[in-house]
Image (tube, rainbow, N blue to C red):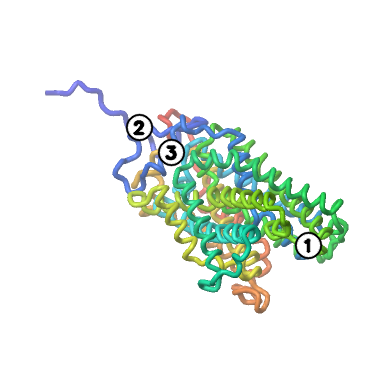
Amino acid sequence: MTSTAPPPPPPPSRDRIPEAPDRVELPTGAAPDDSRFVNEDLLPVPLERRNWTTYNFAALWVGMAHNIPSWLLASGLVALGMDWKQAVFTIALANLIVLGPMLLTGHAGPKYGIPFPVLARASFGLRGANLPALIRAAVACAWFGIQTWIGGVGIFTLLGKIFGGWAEADEIGGQPWTLWLCFVLFWALELAIIYRGMDTLRRFENWAAPFVIVGALVLLVWVAVKAGGFGPLLDQPSKLGWGKEFWPVFFPSLMGMIAFWATLSLNIPDFTRFGAGQRAQIRGQSLGLPTTMTLFALLSVLVTSGSQAVYGEAIWDPVQLVARTDNVFGLLYALVTVLVATISVNVAANVVSPAYDLANLAPKLINFRTGALITGVVGVVIMPWKLTETPELYIFTWLGLVGGLLGTVAGILIADYWIVRRTVLDLADLYRPGGRYWYTNGWNWRAVAAFAVGGVLAIGGSHSEPGKGPFPADGLIPFLKPLADYGWAVGLASSLVLYVLLTGRESVTPGSSSGSAAR
């Protein structure tokens, strides 16, 4: 008997890329349920849950930017010989520059609802995406441990001032047991917040952002009142001037400041995937990142200036400054501010990304919450108290390497999404083995080659002063040493150009599709 049912529609042509609407949703059943590349946390966010507004994104950045390491950025630049105007200018310019790739990679979030490791599948392949994802996860785990240790030390310092005697407690592993207790309790609090999911994080950032701003302004007013005005630091001339001594310090410092948020320029889709639209993420990030970082740098300089007038020395660490007061209420307020400020950046910047990245590695075994717990454990195992012992290793070597490698990945993502595909992706094939993003056994050799070449150019010339770092004075690859001070820019530009040359522009022919586009 002949069937009267109509034949199934033909599959979409692999040579034609249908026009994708502004916001794409994965049709029900389009992604294979039994695939080893799928779990609930990696699937696109449904349209009804893409509801983050401009305020949510601005608050996210305010919460992430207001933390102790951000406060100390300006102090590091002044220590290198800059005056306060040069330091604030360097930080402002760096954050304007890094905002560019932040907005470009963030575009895929509201449009497709996908996190960073799934976006990376389009360029690196379904399996190859684990390469940039694990690099990003490793960096985040290290930062998580460092930030948690810094926060724990801050709590230990302020509680010791309130209760007294904490620093004299019996030592375990070279540190007072009370410091370990603060570290562990703070670590557990961070994981408890992120374990409740992204909506809890959004609500936390909404109120944490204004709270931290108020805390910083209170500290500024307190110091100004005690100082009777701001001290001599604002009048101190630059030790470098604006001539030939300034620029050799400026450019590596600029790259270091860019590298501070180069991590988020990759995995910002982890947040923008919840965005109500492109306008929300563009306005929110533009209002939140460069303005907040510049304001915070200015606040740190002004407060430090006041501390010099009051105490006769520049106290750059806000925790150490507050610890000078005997006002219990002030100490408790500062304690809560340190808690909120550190949690807001650490949970958002350093737990969300590796949670998704690790889930991408083994979706059937690891979900978002499991990935967050793994991040917490790794952040302790790396012994962050050791990473922060040497400023040269922590600031310059660490940020230089991170910036170079992450800039290289960002160049490939931007080239693939904006130049090669012109923002058009096949959403279903991002989860389907054998689809258009399968390449060769799940790996795109073009992306790997661009990453390898860009990475070598970016960090191959890494060098250290004798006795101040792990690298040879002449650089790992001596003839690349002149590029080392521009690692992030070199990595991004070289990988972007090479990937486009290896891949070529793809032909995009408008057509119709049920929410997907083909390569």
- Between 65 and 416, the one nearer to me in the picture: 65
Identify the residue at horizontal 54%, vertical 54% (top origin).
409
In the displayed structure, would residue 52 be above or below residue 212?
A: above
Query: Element type at marker 3?
Result: loop
Residue 414, position in %: x, y?
Answer: 56, 47
Nearer mark to the viewer, of 1 and 2? 1
Answer left or right for 431 relative to 188.
left
Q: Is residue 407 visible?
A: yes
Q: CA distance from mark 2 to mark 3?
A: 11 Å
Identify the residue at horizontal 35%, vertical 36% (top origin).
30
**Image quarter in which the C terminus is found:** top left
Mark 2 or mark 3: name the one nearer the start of the chain. Answer: 2
In the displayed structure, would residue 125 be above or below residue 198?
A: below
Q: What crowding class fits label 1: few (fewer than 14 Cα within 10 Å), some (14-19), or many (20 or more)?
A: some
Mark 1 or mark 2: name the one nearer the start of the chain. Answer: 2
Please identify the residue farthest to the left as the structure is shown: 1
The residue beneath circle 2 is 28
The residue beneath circle 3 is 44
Query: Element type at marker 2?
Result: loop
The residue beneath circle 1 is 314
Residue 479, position in %: x, y?
Answer: 64, 72
Residue 318, position in %: x, y?
Answer: 70, 56
Tell me whether circle 2 and circle 3 mark residues in contact (CB < 8 Å): no
> Tag 1: residue type?
Ala
Mark 1 or mark 3: name the one nearer the start of the chain. Answer: 3
- Between 309 and 468, the one nearer to me in the picture: 309
> Tag 2: residue type?
Thr
Q: CA distance from mark 1 to mark 2?
A: 60 Å
